Amino acid sequence: MDNIESLLEELTNADGPSGFEGPVRSIMQREFSPLCSHMETDGMGSLMARLGEDDGPPRIMMAAHMDEVGLMVKFVTAEGYVRFQPLGGWLDQALINQRWVILTRNGPVQGVSGIKTPHVMTTEARNQVFKRDQMFIDVGADSLEDAEERLGIRPGDPITPDSRFTILSGGSLYMAKAWDDRIGLAVMVEVMRRLKNLPPPNTLYAVSTTQEEVGLRGAHTSSYRVEPDIGINLEAGVAGDYPGISQEESQERVGKGPAIFLHDTSMMPNLKLRDLFIDVAKEKEIPIQFDVLNGYGEDGAEIQRSRGGAPTINIAVPTRYLHSHYGVISRQDFDHTLELIVAVIQRLDAATVHDLKSFD
Ligand code: CO
C-alpha cells in the first residue's frame, strides 16, 4: 500500500456525517500542518489552509467537503430500537439491512438496520420497497433506559455507515464509503504537497468544508472568509458505466479521467475557466471527460456566488454507487485529477485571472 492508498483508506474509514466532521478535520489538520503556513477554522468548522504567505490576489480557493451522508438519532423506542433522521440524500433501499455506527459521547455503538424476515411475508409484501420511516437500528439494547444509560445514546447523535476501505481484485479500483467527498480532500492534500516546493503565481487556499450534504452550508461561510478570485471545487463524480444507468443520465466512466461538470442543479461553470482546463489537459496529455447532470448540488455553487461572485468550476473523480455504504473509484482517475489541478493552478497568475474575471 503506498502513501496515497493509506491516505484514501484513512479518510474514507473516518466518521464524519454532516455536522460531525471533527475526525476528518483532524486528519486534514495533520496532513496540512507541514505543508501550509496558515490554518484556521471558521464559525461552522470549515478548515481554511493557505499555502505560503498571503501574497494578495489572485486568491485561488480549492474546496472539498468533509461531511458524508449519514443519519442522526431521532429517538429511541421503549423497546430500545433507534429511530433515525437521514442526513443527506439517501435512497430508502440503500438504508435497509446495513451496518451502522452511532457516535455517542461514550464512544461508538454498532448496530444494524434490521429487515423483516421473508419467512413471514406474503408475496405482495416481498415485492414492496421498505420506506425509511418504517426503519430502525438494532443496537442490542433491551429498553430505552438501557440504550440511554448503558450505551450513552442521545437524540441528535450522528450515525455513520459502517464500511471499510477495500482494494478490489488487488488492482487499481478502490471500494469504500464516503468517496463523496473524501476523494476531493485527498486531491487537495496531494496538490498542496506538490506545490509546496513549486510555489504557484497566486495565493492558494485549500478549504475543507462542513455540512455540504445538508445544503452547502460550510462553503457559504468559508468562501466569504477566503474571498476567492477563482473557485475550484473538487468532488466525487457520477460514473454512468454500470448496468442500469444510461449516458443520458450521466456521461462519466471510471478510468477515463477527471470530469468537468458543465451542468448540475446548483451551478454551471465559467466557460473561460472550462477552456483553460481543456487547454491544459491537452497540453499535458491528461484525459478528461464532461458531465451534464439533471440533479446533484455541490459547494462550487456557494463559491461562485460568494460576495461579488467568482469564476468557478467543479472537477470530479468518477465514482460508482454514490450515497451508499460502498462506492468505487479508480486510482488512475485520482492521479490524473491531481496532475490536472496542479498544472492549472500553476497557470493562474494575475493576468490570466484578470482575463477570466473580465466580461467585456
Ligand atoms: Co459531495
Image (tube, helix red, strand yellow):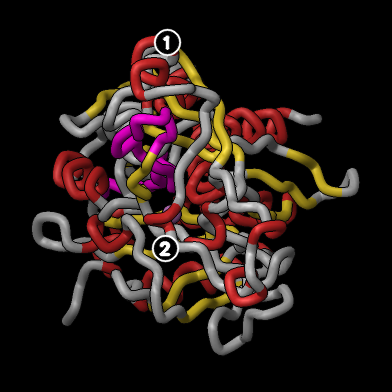
Cα distance between the residues tagged 1 and 2: 45 Å
**Quarter of the image containing the C terminus?**
bottom left
Q: Which residue does the numbered mark 1 point to in the structure image? A: 150
Within 10 Å of disc 1 (Cα), the crowding (few <14, some 14-19, many 20+) is few
Residue type (three-letter) at the residue carrying disc 2: Asn
Closer-to-camera residue (37/65): 65
Label annotation for residue 136: none
Which secondary structure, mark 2? strand
Residue that numbered label 2 is attached to? 314
Q: Where does the image place residue 273, in percent across and percent down from the top left?
A: 38, 69
Residue furthest out toward the bottom: 248
Q: Is residue 43 left or right of residue 152?
A: left
Q: Is residue 141 left or right of residue 18?
A: right
Q: Position of residue 336 (x, y in %)?
A: 66, 56
Q: Ligand 1 is found in which quarter of the picture?
A: bottom left
Q: Which residues are magenta?
A: 58-82
Asked if disc 1 is less than 8 Å from ligand 1, the answer is no
Indicate whether residue 275 is drawn in magenta: no
Q: Give the left or right position of residue 307, taking residue 190 as reference.
A: left
* Quarter of the image where one finds residue 337: bottom right
Of labels 1 and 2, the one closer to you: 1
